[in-house]
Image (cartoon, rainbow, N blue to C red):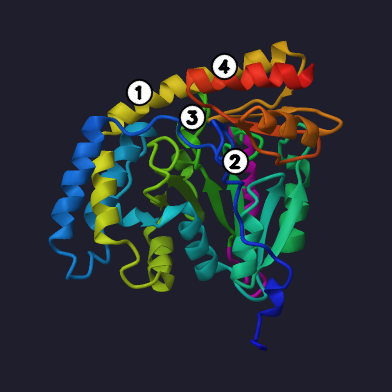
Amino acid sequence: MSIPYRPALAGFEPYGAPQLDVPVALNVNENPYAPSPALIADIASAVAGAAGTLNRYPDREFLDLRQDLADYLAVESKVRLAPEQIWAANGSNEVMLHILQAFAGPDRSVLTFIPSYSMYPEYARDTNSTMVTVPRKDDFSIDLAELSDIFARYRPAVVLLASPNNPTGTALSTDELTAVMEASIGNGPEDAPGSDCLVVVDEAYGEFRRDGVLSALELLSTYDNLAVSRTMSKAFGAAGLRLGYLGTSREIVDQLRIVRMPYHLSALTQAAARAALAHSSEQLSQVQGIREARNEMAERLSSLGLEVAPSDANFVMFGTFPDRHRIFADLLDRGILIREVGPDGWLRVSVGTPEENDAFFAALEEALA
């Protein structure tokens, strides 16, 4: 049989972290705590109510959900947005795909600084965009002295910046964010003379940032070419819900509305997400415990003589190892699954429950010995 495979996809494998049946899985940065019984009950009730209308299409504009998300951000980040400034989709992956469908595409480039999230090149590939990657400095920061030249050379339509960054865990400083935004002004794609680049700050792990670390949401009132992406997968412990969202200008949201598929958020997803958001204070309290556990994990790794990247996320990147795969494999043999990702020599481990973290360190000490 001969079918017309798309040449650009030749040789690629589907994205996905290993999904293995092991006692301790600390490889995909999930929240280790299941929803509370009260939250489960409220989600079940909300979904049951929505199920009675499944013969009808869902609310295409989902303004009630967008209002709830705006209310949540006003508490979490102290930034008040109108519901029309919020967009949501099936995970932040779909949000990013909407952005590239609307603003990138053929003959336009997408810029990021590596190491960073491994899905970014796939978003570019899937939208026929040109991916441009620029190496970060040795400490995983962005070289601010080079920004003007980089933007002028590549004229990106979209810039994707993860903060906190995955896989390093490092967040962008205020100086870095501001410098990127300033460099983006007037350096949009050549087929749109005088335009600015659309800068997307991916804050999937934003709730875990340390005290005093800026959220890019605070810059939305200053830069109308900025969008800030979030997710309910991590802080809300709702990876299975698949609900990502962003805050930006109404004009940018309107462009995303053009490219989205009709009725892309099911009535069940909307109901479940709204029920979860009603428990946001409970979830943010849990986040504080995960932040503390992350700091303890970083200290324990350092005490073993390992190098640890500063983390504002719910994971820690550590190393460096002449043969990181041996450490990864030794841990797996002991029932501990982490992630072999990022720069050579480094490994990444998600924060688990206290019992999972203890099991990880026991196995790691054996592997190091």
Q: Which residue is mark 2?
A: 177
Q: Closer to the camera, 46 or 84?
A: 46
Q: Which residues are magenta?
A: 174-195
Q: Closer to the camera, 48 or 154?
A: 48
> In the image, 66: left or right of 338?
left
Residue 192 picture location, percent across and down: 60, 73
Looking at the image, tell me whether mark 4 or mark 3 is earlier in sequence order.
3
Q: Which residue is at the far bottom?
A: 2
> In the image, 135: left or right of 254?
right
The reply to whether residue 185 is in sight is no
Asked if 211 appears above or below 315 in the picture, the reply is above
For label 2, count other residues whose C-alpha is less than 10 Å away and answer few (under 14), some (14-19) or many (20+): many
For label 1, count other residues whose C-alpha is less than 10 Å away and answer few (under 14), some (14-19) or many (20+): few
Cα–Cα gap, marks 3 and 1 = 11 Å
Q: Which residue is mark 4?
A: 358
Q: Which residue is at the far right?
A: 322
Cα–Cα gap, marks 1 and 4 = 22 Å
Looking at the image, tell me whether mark 1 or mark 2 is earlier in sequence order.
2
Looking at the image, tell me whether mark 4 or mark 2 is earlier in sequence order.
2
Viewer-side label of 3, 2: 3
> In the image, 128: left or right of 366?
left
Looking at the image, tell me whether mark 1 or mark 4 is earlier in sequence order.
1
Tell me which amino acid carries mark 3.
Phe
Position of the N terminus, as image quadrant, is bottom right
Q: Which residue is mark 3?
A: 208
